[in-house]
Amino acid sequence: MKDCIFCKIPAQESEKLLFKDDACYVIYDKYPIEKGHMLVISLQHYENLLEVPEDISAKMIAVAKRFGKSALEEFKATGINIVANNGRDANQIIMHAHIHVLPRYPNTSGKPHYKIAGAKE
């Protein structure tokens, strides 16, 4: 899709890529909820994870698991959320399929450190 930021990243900002294969790529979230917050993003444009073909979504989930495990070690996280927001009412902000890999730590609120315009409280 021409104006989609997630469609542009692999070509325009390749130095930000943590990983890339034939199905997806991984970057750090621009607005992290916690240290090490990453996104696993489909290479092809799909509006949300529910639209992604199963062979591609399976690869995306495998990548999310791999990066979740590495976050436990690298960032000394004590837990991991792996989640996909599907649709505006689920707080999906960018309408391109992606999975959040969200390291969690003791004594943190788990709330964003920023305000998303239009997001539900």
Image (tube, rainbow, N blue to C red):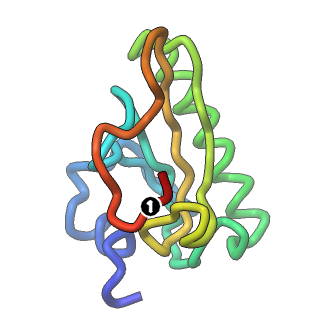
Q: Looking at this rendering, what residue extends furthest in the front direction?
A: 121
39 to 94, vertically: above or below = above
Q: Which residue is mark 1?
A: 119
Q: Looking at this rendering, what residue extends furthest in the right direction?
A: 54
119 to 95, vertically: above or below = above
Q: Looking at this rendering, what residue extends furthest in the bottom direction?
A: 2
Q: Position of residue 118 (x, y in %)?
A: 40, 67
Q: Tell me which corner region of the image, top left, top right, bottom left or bottom right, holds residue 69.
A: top right
99 to 37, vertically: above or below = below
Indicate the amino acid at tag 1.
Answer: Ala
35 to 18, vertically: above or below = above
Which of the two residues, 70 or 96, is positioned nearer the viewer here? 96
Residue at image position (44%, 61%) is 119
Say which element carries label 1. Answer: loop
Q: Is residue 6 left or right of residue 63?
A: left
Quadrant containing the N terminus is: bottom left
Residue at image position (59%, 69%) is 89
Give the class, few, some or many, for how many residues have Cα within 10 Å of label 1's Cα (few <14, many ≥20): few
Q: Position of residue 29 (x, y in %)?
A: 34, 46
Q: Tell me which corner region of the image, top left, top right, bottom left or bottom right, holds residue 81.
A: top right
Q: Is residue 36 left or right of residue 120?
A: left
Q: Position of residue 63 (x, y in %)?
A: 59, 42
The number of numbered discs placed on residues in the rendered structure image is 1
Residue at image position (67%, 47%) is 61
